[in-house]
Amino acid sequence: MAKSPVFLKPLIGLLLGLSLGGKSVAQVNVRDSLVSVFMFGASGGFSFPVGAFSDRVSLVYPVGGEVWYKFKQYIQIGASGHFMFGERIKDTTFATNLLPIVGGDGSFPAISATFQGAMFRGMVSGLLPLGKPNRNSGLMLMLSGGYTATWYSLRTAGSLTPQLESPYHKGYDRMSTGTVWSQMLGYQYLSNNRKINFYFGLEFHQAVLYHQRGFQYDVGELPQDSRTELYMGLRAAWLFPVYKRTNQSYIDFR
């Protein structure tokens, strides 16, 4: 069988390479270029109530998760969900007309109340790069808005307490829902080696809430007016970016 002429070998390799579209895969270069990337995050922090809200609750701790998409420009959009809980309830007026509280076994159990809530927001942020470590890191201004709900969680130590069991607890828990708007000034860091990625900043919230229960047993009325809750504090997030891969064509003549 006759051998193919030597000059045909590279020609055949070229034709096969063009027809099969051989490819190699490489990751985007975070160090030297602006990149688009999906990021998942776990975040938490603490906030100090401001104004009238500070008379009801001490500290508020948000804990939750978020997802982001960073465009090749200096813009990011995202969504987040956070559970909130308070360190201590200062407002104890809900218990004034309950005393004495008698348990099912005739005892007088201690009652405790904690602040709880949830917050779901859409977010947009802009970056101002500072040069290092890359153009995907820098000062961050974040604006967000969404839905929030807050309530008191009532607990008693010891025996079952009929006065505070379902559905009667709804007359005391102060559940309210409404809109929340937030602003954050912080710093975002996406490392060149992709291992350390985070942001942190100072955040300010404004929530407008409306009472959601039919009647408050302890005060004997149905609140009609809205109330505003203001709080500010620090929040940080650990980010998990999912970088795209770029396809680069190649032809192997070996």
Image (cartoon, grey):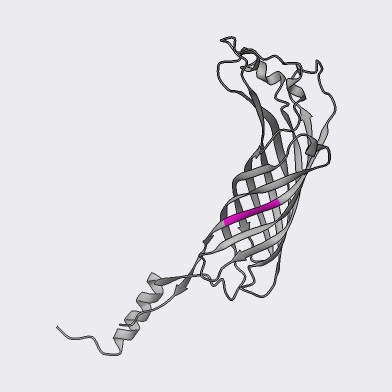
Q: Residue at x 64, y 48 (%)?
A: 79
| Whether residue 193 is situated above or below residue 11 in the rendered picture | above
Residue 90: image location, x then y, percent: 74, 33
Give me the residue at 37% from left, 80% from top: 14
**Which residue is depicted at the point 56% across and 10% down?**
105
Magenta-colored stretch includes residue 237: yes
Quarter location, residue 64: top right
Specify the quadrant of the image occupied by residue 91.
top right
- The answer to whether residue 215 is visible is no
Judge by depth and name the residue closer to the eye, 89 or 25. Answer: 89
Q: How many marks?
A: 0
Position in image of residue 244 (x %, y %) = 52, 63
The segment highlighted magenta reads: 234-238
x and y percentages locating residue 197 in the rendered image: 57, 62
Quarter assignment of residue 56: top right
Q: Residue furthest right?
A: 225
**Outermost left residue:** 1
Quadrant that contains the C terminus: bottom left
Q: Is residue 250 left or right of residue 160?
A: left
Q: Is residue 30 visible?
A: yes
The furthest residue to the front: 107
The main secondary structure of the magenta stretch is strand
**Residue 150 in the figure: left or right of residue 52:** left
Q: Is residue 233 above or below residue 20?
A: above
- Return the residue nearer the eye: 43 or 93: 93
Of residues 197 and 146, the one nearer the viewer is: 197
68 falls in the magenta region? no
User: Please, is residue 36 above or below residue 215 in the view?
Assistant: below
Q: In which quadrant of the rendered image does the N terminus lie?
A: bottom left
- At a point 66% along the width and 58% down the height, the residue shown is 200
